[in-house]
Amino acid sequence: MNRKNVIIIDANLRFLRSVIATNKVHISALITDYKRAEQVKQEFGEIPQYYRFPTDSQFEEMHSTDYNLTYEDIETYRSAQLKVEHFLHRYVLEIATIQNQYFTALAFWLGFFEKNNIDMVFSAEIEHGAIWDSLIMEIARVQNIPVYTISVSSGNFRKSLASVIHFNNKSFVNLSNIVLPRPDVTQYLTNLHQDSLNSTQKIGFKHPYKYFYNTRIKRIPHSIRNFFSTPYQRYKKLRERIDILSQFEIPKSAKYVDDLKNLYDKLSKVPNYNEKYIYVPLHQDPEAVTMARPTLTSSLYMIKLLSLYCPKNWKIYVKEHPVQFFIYEKSEYFLKNAHYFRTPRFYKTLKMLKNVELIDIQTNSNKLIANASAVASIGGSSLIQAAIDNKPIIIFGGGIHFAELLKDSFTINCVKDVGNAMSQIIKDYPKKYFYEDFEDIINSYVFEINYQEQETQCVDLFHRLMESL
């Protein structure tokens, strides 16, 4: 049997078993988490593995190559460089280190594609803009090799609604005749409403004193040692993996986030539900939804465009993501370089825009949606909730959210589209949008990922993808 050479990006091995079960695939490379290395070896044998977050020495060893990187190559993949640099700023701010890793990886993967006749790239991950996903996908796209990736439109820690995207042209793969775990739409919507009821509780840290102890008191000895250390001693303590926080970084970043939250509280207001307003729920930043997947990645620019076409008697209500200031209790990881992604200037710029109001973070999002004249976002669950509530939705993401396929949604592809959408919404007000094709779109383009299960059964999907090659 002539097996196809495929690169698989699957950090949690959720799809790998289904890929292998087709018996049509030779896995040329598996990109996964370094913690999975032994599991892969024991369960699947000697599959070439590349880790998402290697140590510095592992990175150099993994990306050793004799490929002759040219300046033409560098120019060809500038878009990938932009994504990678933005992603790596989550972990390191030194541009020299970032660019060294990018060019090293670019040379390696170009050499890898040159030596291996790759037929397809499949990513089970939301695109992050990393060396281990976006760079590989961009090389495949330029070389006209099919790339398929999973795109999550909505979800939580239990389940997600996902689609398959043909990365080469950002189109949604029709899944209607493919055997996949299908969402129970009624139950899923019930869960969304239940989440909304739960969200009426006060947003904040679940254990504020414990969080303060873990991020401040507990780190005092590390901060003191760092203060009295010489530059050489600090140099010797530099970590081998860039995604890990230094102990003395934690209190500094935690204090920065607390100050930012206090500033937001001072700038924000309680909404007036009698006003006509476009509701814009901000995404957590940094977050995969806005880092690399959408064509337009800037929430600020999106809101500026809405402000440009917003009439004087309408408002744009912007509310910070519920976990923007509080996710650090659960994941200290996000404290790394927190000051790079949200700053006081971000809010200052928003406040300068006409008709824009920052809304109290304690305000219930579903109530904001229910009373909105329209909802605008790059992606996320709010678009689904707005469609359920029969509200006009304006989608800026481009090829990442199944709601873009709804006939009555406003999908933005250029600046003029924003003006046209706003004009139509104002003209139609207070018309309800019923999205009669909602369930058809769900059935044709959406499947369910259950995070409480070890894997997602999708053998039929890979059979179909292989047949398309």
Image (cartoon, helix red, strand yellow):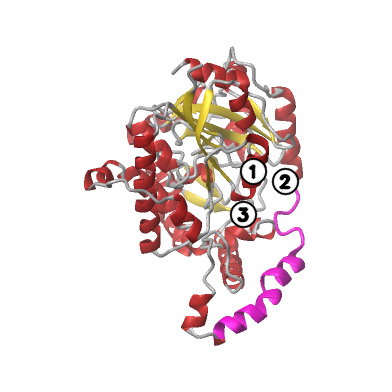
- Main SS type for the magenta part? helix
Identify the residue under disc 3: 360
Badge 3: few (under 14), some or many (20 or more) residues near its Cα, within 10 Å? some
N-terminal-most mark, 1 or 3? 3
Give the secondary structure at mark 2: loop
Circle 2: residue type: Ser
Viewer-proximal residue among 456 and 255: 456
Q: Which mark is residue 199?
A: 2
Quarter in which the C terminus is drawn: top left
Quarter where residue 78 is shown = top left
Q: Which mark is residue 352?
A: none
Badge 1: few (under 14), some or many (20 or more) residues near its Cα, within 10 Å? some
Residue 299: x %, y % from top left: 45, 47
Q: In the rendered structure, are the residues bearing label 1 and label 3 in contact, judged by CB atoms less than 8 Å apart?
A: no
Residue situated furthest bottom in the rendering: 228
Q: Residue at x 39, y 39 (%)?
A: 112
Q: CA distance from mark 1 to mark 3?
A: 10 Å
Viewer-proximal residue among 92 and 12: 12
Q: Which region is colored magenta?
A: 200-227
Residue 5: x %, y % from top left: 46, 28
Q: Which mark is residue 365?
A: 1
Viewer-proximal residue among 392 and 227: 227
